[in-house]
Image (cartoon, rainbow, N blue to C red):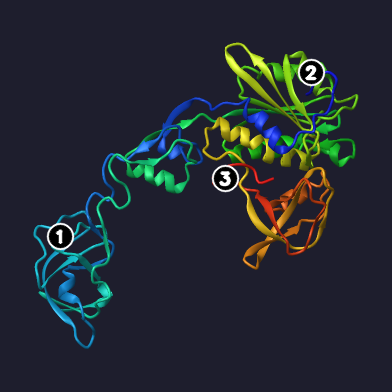
Amino acid sequence: MTRPDRTADWLTIREATDVILGSVARLDAETIDLLDAAGRTLATDVTAPRDQPPWDNSAMDGYAVLAEDVRGASKADPRRLKLVESIAAGEFPSRDAGPGEAIRIMTGAPIPRGADSVIRIEHTRVVDAINVEVLDDADAGRNIRLRGEDLREGEIVLEKGALLRAGEIGVLATVGRARVQVCRRPRIAILSTGNELVDLDGFAEVLAGRRIVNSNSYALAAACSAVGAQPVLLGIAPDESAAIRARVEGVIDRCDALVTSAGASVGEHDVVKDALETLGMNAAFWRVRIRPGSPFSFGTIQRTGQAPLPVFGLPGNPVSAIVTFEILVKPAIRAMLGRRTIHPPTILVRVGRAIESRAGLVRFLRVRLANADAGLPRAELTGNQGSGVLTSVARADALLVVPLDVDRLEAGEVAVAVPLQEQDAAQIAPGF
């Protein structure tokens, strides 16, 4: 997937990301039930229709009182108050609280006018049916949740682009959104290529030593789902231009992006580029300064009445495919989803052991995060870092970043890592 002369561009990750993001756009919105919205991306701002909580309410089971009536109370010197009413959750007070009075109240129940404190039950002692004693004044002026302290009527409570997690779903329920507008999930077509590959139903050939199993399609489908996209598996195409073209032609107009794995270098059997160029693909670049995964390419296919189809050419080595998807493809999918944050989230870690590298490429090493070392997680390599060692990813919590101009990370040195889990982290631009 490059220009006919096959000249490598060798873009930096930042340059490649800028090209990719300039070629994708946010998708349209759809309205779904709130119970189906977890993991989706909010398409519109949401405002509060009323204050929340709608009234001052109790944060404790206890007694609503006036603070001046209980100050100085202790077990040795209790304050006796007259019990005048009881308010359960869901009920409203029928009277105000006056001096020398206590009103039994449950968590969430409205605070009666006049009361400015809720004394928790464990700080009281019931004397008889009409009297209660306060044994501690620690709750004077406390344990009241004020009207509107969570949400104010008319304020924006969730902004478009928010990832809908448990907290966001709860807020949507709080403001009465039984249905919610979310960005449509991008449909990502995934095609693996190679005469050597066989799918899981042909695993006997793998056991016989004749074929290699197609793991990339499954790994990339899982990565798509994790970021909020819908994978569309095209299976395996042999190294034949006509076969590749036949697989792709049927999805050009019904998917939002195409991801291929293998056929990303310049060998004579890498025919993916040729096949896609016959479909009108406009190549943007080939080769990125990243390891593993440097033979990564990107282009677009023009479509009638639709935006151009982004085409991501991933290397065939399993680790290379996963790493380049994580670093270069996921930002594009997040942009399609309209996410507020689209770049890979990063954390600071402390290098467990010295690591030799080679300047000129940004390396992403698979690491496990161990107990904190001087306040930061300690990053330990998961073993052999070869681009074909898929277990190095399965054992990893994060990708340790070795910057472009660095040839060695010392033990104990602070470095950047990309967590291998989907997050809605606040980051403006990549840190590598």
Which is nearer the N-term, disc 2 or disc 3? Answer: 2
How many other residues sit within 10 Å of disc 1, few (<14), some (14-19) or many (≥20)? many
Q: Quadrant of residue 21?
A: top right
Residue type at tag 1: Pro
On the image, the x and y values in percent for residue 200 come to 76, 36
Would you say 129 lies left or right of 262 here? left
Is label 2 in a helix, a strand or a loop?
helix
Given contact means CB atoms under 8 Å apart, are the residues at marks 3 and 1 in contact? no
Residue 32 lies, with reference to residue 114, above or below; the image says above
Q: Quadrant of residue 110?
A: bottom left
Which is nearer the N-term, disc 3 or disc 1? Answer: 1
Q: Nearer the viewer, residue 349 or 76?
A: 349
Residue type at tag 2: Ala
Residue type at tag 3: Gln
Determine the residue located farthest toward the top in the rendered image.
304
Q: Nearer the viewer, residue 373 or 275?
A: 373
- Residue carrying label 2: 275
| Alpha carbon separation for disc pair 3 and 1 | 45 Å
Residue 271 lies, with reference to residue 305, above or below; the image says below
Mark 3 against mark 1, which lies toward the viewer?
A: 3
- Residue carrying label 3: 427
Q: Nearer the viewer, residue 91 or 133?
A: 133
Q: Is residue 232 visible?
A: no
Task: In the rendered structure, find residue 391 and report the number of the disc placed on it.
Answer: none
Quarter of the figure with the C terminus: top right
Quarter of the figure with the N terminus: top right
Q: Quadrant of residue 244?
A: top right
Q: Residue drawn 21% across and 67% down?
A: 117
